[in-house]
Image: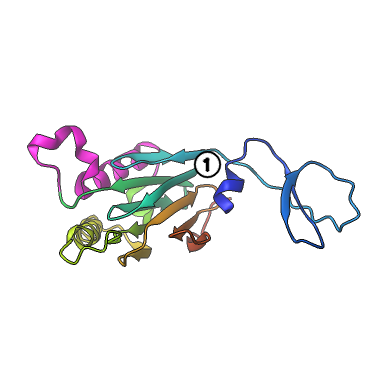
């Protein structure tokens, strides 16, 4: 997966064996096979676990993995190259008895996401989002939390006038979401599948 390559800690190179097509990570190699060189800019990967909200403006990777009924809300400011990711667990706003776990709730998590981005230098009008998750992975016929999370998150984003540029939600499959801050790219996986591009911010500042 691309995320696994991005997570390496040194600049290395990929070469491929002409006969097997198998790629390996290595330094310069003398081989009888055709050598395919591709330089990789390797970036820090920051995990965003359930109920967490994190921001990054240093060109790293934000990711939330194994998302079931939760939602990953990936927000990006192309002008400032600032990204944030909220891993929302529950719809609505946290009750008074859950104030220590506010960011698990859609309204509070999105509030914190916006605040972290503006503190990092974003203009609120420049924030765009993608949402991933909300799958009924246990396939319970009476389980409404998935749809409640999706509906609540969309409604809160609309109320805050934050555009949703892409989404991969619902169904019964677990998902993961990855945001490449420098490239302005959001990727996702479904089940054990390969990474796919969900959205690309084209208007990046030089």
Front-most of residues 198 and 113: 198
User: Residue 19 at what x, y percent from top left?
Assistant: 81, 63
Residue 6 lies, in percent from the top left, at 59, 45
Q: Quadrant of residue 108?
A: top left
Q: Is residue 119 above or below residue 3?
A: above
Q: Main secondary structure of the magenta part?
A: helix
Residue named by callout 1: 60
Residue at 74% from the left image edge and 52% from the top image edge: 38
Label 1 crowd bin: few (<14), some (14–19), many (20+), radius 10 Å = many
Q: Nearer the viewer, residue 30 or 80?
A: 30
In the picture provided, is 78 more to the left or to the right than 96? right
The x, y position of residue 140, in whole percent, is 21, 63
* Side of 186 relative to 159 (left or right): right
- 40 and 143: which is toward the camera: 143
**Residue nearest the viewer, comparing 111 with 124:** 111
Please give the name of the residue rendered at 90% of the width and 46% of the height, measured from the top-left corner. 30
Counting from the top left corner in percent of width and height, residue 141 is at 19, 67
Q: Is residue 90 magenta?
A: no
67 left or right of 80? Answer: left
Q: Does residue 57 appear in the picture of this structure?
A: no
Point out the residue furthest to the top here. 100
Query: What's the magenta region?
Result: 93-122
Q: Is residue 157 left or right of residue 81?
A: left
Q: How is the image coloured?
A: rainbow
Q: SS of the residue at dot 1?
A: loop
Please tell me how many numbered marks the rendered image carries.
Answer: 1
In magenta stretch: residue 114: yes
């Amino acid at each position: 997966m691309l995320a696994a390559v991005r997570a390496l800690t040194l600049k290395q190179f990929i070469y491929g064996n002409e006969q097997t097509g198998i790629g390996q990570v290595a330094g310069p190699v003398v081989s009888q096979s055709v050598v395919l060189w591709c330089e990789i800019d390797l970036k820090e990967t920051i995990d965003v676990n359930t109920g967490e909200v994190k921001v990054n403006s240093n060109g790293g990777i934000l990711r939330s993995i194994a998302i079931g009924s939760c939602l990953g809300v990936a927000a990006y400011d192309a002008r400032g190259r600032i990204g944030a990711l909220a891993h929302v667990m529950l719809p609505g706003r946290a009750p008074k008895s859950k104030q220590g776990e506010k960011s698990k709730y859609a309204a509070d998590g999105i509030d914190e996401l916006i605040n972290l981005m503006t503190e990092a230098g974003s203009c609120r009008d420049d924030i765009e989002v993608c949402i991933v998750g909300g799958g009924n992975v246990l396939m319970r016929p009476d389980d409404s939390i998935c749809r409640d999370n999706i509906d609540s998150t969309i409604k809160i984003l609309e109320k805050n006038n934050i555009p949703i540029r892409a989404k991969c939600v619902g169904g019964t499959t677990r998902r993961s979401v990855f945001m490449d801050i420098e490239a302005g790219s959001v990727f996702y996986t479904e089940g054990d599948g390969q990474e796919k591009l969900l959205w690309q911010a084209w208007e990046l500042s030089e």
